[in-house]
Amino acid sequence: MLKTTLRPGIAALALLTAAPGVMAQDLMIGLRAGPDSIDPHWSTLGSQAEALRHVFDTVVDVDDKLQLKPGLALSWEAIDDTTWDFTLREGVTFHDGSPFTAEDVKFSIERIPEVTGPMPMTLYTKYVDSVEVVDDYTLRVKTKGRAPSLPNDFTRLFVVPSETGMEARNEEFNSGEKAIGTGPYKFVSWQPKGDMVLTRNDDYWGDAPAWENVTRREIPDDAARVAALKSGQVDLINYVPATDYVAMQNDSSLETSVSDSIYILNIAPSVKDEVPQPIKVNGKEIDVNPLQDLRVRKALDYAIDRKTLVRVVLEGLGTPANQLMPEGFFGYSDKLGEREYDIEQAKSLLAEAGYPDGFEIDFTCTNNRVPGDAVVCEALAQMWSKLGLTVNAQALNGTVYFPAAAREEYTMTMSAWGTLTGEAAYTYGALVHTKDAEKGFGNFNRSGYTNPEFDKVFGEGSQTLEAEPRRKLYEEASYIAMEDRALIPTVILQTVWASKAGELDFPPRVDQETRAYEITPE
Amino acid sequence: MFGYLIGRLAQAVVVVFAMSIIVFVGVYAIGNPIDVMIDPGATQEIRENLIRQYGLDQPLWRQYFTFVSNIFQGDFGRSMVYNISVTSLVFSRLPATVELVLVSVVIATLIGIPAGLYAGYKPKSPGAKLIMALSVLGFSVPTFWIGMLLIMGFAVELGWLPSGGRGEVARFLWFDTSLATSNGWSHVIMPAINLSLFKMGLLIRLTRAGMVEAMGAEYVRFARAQGLPDRQIVFSHILRNISIPIVTVFGLELGSTLAFAVVTETVFNWPGVGKLIIDSILQLDRPVMVSYLVMVVVLFVMINLIVDLVYARLDPRVRLKGGA
């Protein structure tokens, strides 16, 4: 009844509206998430940085493996223990025509604490003590103590003109009035959770982008995003869900690209004297914490069949992980071999530790944070049950999980961690180092893990300004933490992009960013 | 009449107050929004500064008091995620939802009521049976599934309609609405149909039930005996008599659709308020959650009030008394 009544109407409407034709100069991207604001100093959110990179440039840029490369700064150098000099690019202009100088960088650094929100950018300026403009193209930064990772922090330091003024807030940026950067695209318009419209900056200092007009449309729902691509509304989408990825392999009109991401699902066993959720043997709570025993942690590790996790649970969209960062990152240890699946050895280790019949333990994970977190969680519980453990797996919404995890209410957890800066200090400093508010380490160390040997090597690394010796120390620290099973890495998640076949040339990035100016027509 | 209005508004104030307390305590119990939002690299010092900056270190009663006193000054607060005022955030997305809901309600009414009347007028005919069967489908098949089917059919396979989004908008009176452009209509029609199916099913069944009952009533037999044509009996006598339950359900449905059209909005990527509130819940954006739910309560109270006023217009036996 419904169909016959409405079909003529729909057909008529369809005739009235020309299909949104895609011209060679226009690129329409469907994204899972976009920015929360056009103010580049408002939030550290990944999707925020990804979007605003089109309009604003950062002082230091990163390549597709998250390793540093020149941005607005051509080079940088530590001239003494607490001083960094940045040599800036000459001849760069803002979208309003005014020249870019060191004064603008200084202003941007000083603006951050004034305007930043609940995901504070002060994180990237926490080592900055003072900023001095030596000349138009030289910036001198005095740091609080030695700060070898300052250039890494500046990969998220977006530069706005010093004429912006300290009073400008999100509204002025959202309206476009203050959305003036040096980036490859000029800002046209944006709606919260809606479209971000951009037009090419023909005076860009780098390679000219291929597309004249770019629209970044937010489509948070996975199925809707896939439908938008299939119906031709958008040219490219990110975060294709695993099930659609499998289906797309048989669809010749679509093309997918896959890349390892920076996100790794890690298990964090609490090694405190008293665990927040009791561990039971034969139904009785026990006084000791078995997770304090390295043999038990190793047993948990050996019982994980990572290849099955990838092949079966994640539909092939993952890579077995043996440490907290992907290969090629600063501080990645080559000495750590592949993690073996060995259930027999796991059982004997557990028996050696005094738990031949296993124990009962709670295991809590996120269920909406990254693709596959809930299914991996359940699969792990099954794998451990082969070891003789009774695992009460619970996958929770991040809204519930994170506050409770921060209160350290869980005995054993699994969540995703991404090494956003591409180097070890960010990850091992926050997750593995002993909790130390003064030094700013161990903020996300919720398992109570502490290892003086690790702290010593890592601490030395964090005080070493020369890159190569520092890399060696971080590699050593990674090795120590992983051999000690401070955390147990499981799989590196992969990200999938999809586009119409044969239309776009798209280099996938490990940081999952979709940068319009790196995409070219095929 | 005036006393009645005052009474109802006083009731509304109490409901809004109770609701705001429930929401506030509930949201407070979930936990600290900073822990959901904060970047993993942040130091303990940064975290504590933030908690202080947003007043989250204050006791619950004081946070609530601040919230209420701000509302009395017309300030619903600023979104923690977007740093723009909650009012402008909600009102930037409200027109999209309103137009979607209006179109779907019109579709549901224009199809649902005549279909229900027919099904009740000739309950034994095959047409009536078909209508009743379809109406069951209308409210038992999940919205998101029908939505996906519509998208697969009309957007992906046939390519007649866009798969989602809100098309071009143009200014009509004080609003930017997509109903003023043909491109906008092509975007709104599919989600509106999707959203209307449930209401349509409900209206069909309500109308039919009323119709069947009325057909056997004294006044209808009397009208028949008088020799009035069936058309006149149905449209000027029966319809008027059975409209009270229809208006009630219609009003409630209108309110809940306006507030929570979220499933359809998500599937069709429609930039309405439903999606906004779900995102706010996922990010624990407290000011938006609390203020929005308070606004929803106000909306429901208003709709109920209007429904009551319509009763009095429809049925002279209903008298509106103060404080009722």
Image (spheres, rainbow, N blue to C red):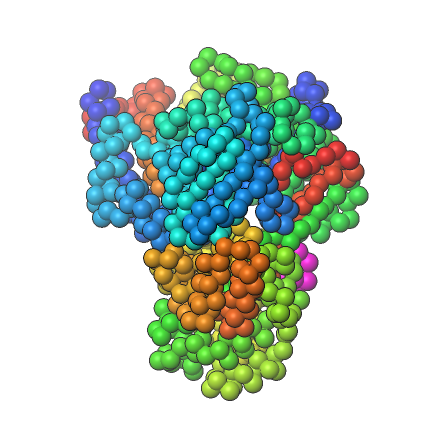
Q: Position of residue B43 (x, y in %)?
A: 38, 52
Q: Residue at x 22, y 48 (%)?
A: B59
Q: Residue furthest top?
A: B173
Q: Quadrant of the N terminus of chain A?
A: top right
**Residue B96 relative to residue A307: left or right:** left
In the image, residue B208 sits, relative to residue A69, either above or below, namely: above
Residue toward you, B77 or A505? A505
Residue A312 painted magenta: yes
In the image, residue A165 sits, relative to residue A502, either above or below, namely: above
Region in magenta: A308-317
Is residue A181 in view from this perspective? yes
Q: Residue at x 58, y 39 (%)?
A: A74
Residue B170 painted magenta: no
In the image, residue B191 sits, relative to residue B230, either above or below, namely: below
Is residue A265 in view from this perspective? no
Q: Quadrant of the C terminus of chain A?
A: top right
Q: Position of residue A467 (x, y in %)?
A: 55, 55
**Residue B126 relative to residue A366: left or right:** right
Q: Residue at x 46, y 63 (%)?
A: A460
Q: Position of residue B303 (x, y in %)?
A: 36, 28
Q: Position of residue B91 (x, y in %)?
A: 41, 26
The part of the image, by quadrant, that contains residue A41 is: top left
Residue toward you, A396 or A462? A462
User: How many marks on residues?
Assistant: 0
Q: Residue at x 26, y 37 (%)?
A: B67
**Residue A239 relative to residue A459: left or right:** right
Residue toward you, B165 or A287? A287
Chief SS of the magenta region: helix
